[in-house]
Image (cartoon, helix red, strand yellow):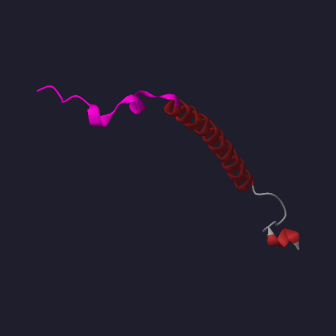
Amino acid sequence: MAKALLGYVGGSDPRLIAEMRRLQQRVQDLESELVRIQAENDALAAAASQDSLLESIDAHQAEPALT
């Protein structure tokens, strides 16, 4: 019954196995990229929270632009 549900007839199709391996590798690559991007995002968020340059500017008392 399980073989019929999976379309299994007499042996594994090499193309199906190759496609499965390719997709598994792609998933691993995407997971690694996600971890890298999350770490980069965390670093940028930490840097932005420590950056007090924008917080120190008082727009109400800013000097006019030079003309």
52 in relation to 20, above or below: above
Residue at image position (18%, 30%) is 64
Residue 62 lies within the magenta run: yes
Furthest residue in direction top, as rendered: 66
Q: How many marks?
A: 0
Horizontal arrangement in the rendering, residue 14 relative to residue 52 (left or right): right
Image: magenta residue range: 50-67
Q: Residue furthest front?
A: 61
The foreground one among 10 and 32 is: 32
In the depicted structure, whether residue 42 falls above or below residue 16:
above
Q: Which residue sits at x=67%, y=50%?
A: 23
Q: Nearer the viewer, residue 50 or 41?
A: 50
Residue 41 in the image: state x and y as whole percent: 55, 37
Reply above or below: 58 against 2. above
Q: Residue furthest left?
A: 67
Q: Which residue is at the front of the view, 55 or 26?
A: 55
**Residue ID at (47%, 28%):** 51
Point out residue 30 in the picture as x, y percentages from the top left corner. Answer: 62, 44
Q: Is residue 22 magenta?
A: no
Residue 36 located left or right of residue 7: left
To which quarter of the image does residue 52 belong? top left
Q: Quadrant of residue 12?
A: bottom right
Quarter containing the C terminus: top left
The quadrant of the rendering that contains the N terminus is bottom right
Percent x, y for residue 38? Answer: 60, 39
Residue 22 shown left or right of residue 57 in the figure:
right
Q: Is residue 26 above or below residue 9?
A: above
The single residue placed furthest to the right in the displayed view is 1
Quadrant hosting residue 26: top right
Relative placement, left or right, of 53 versus 36 is left
Residue under the image location 83 percent in, 59 percent down: 11
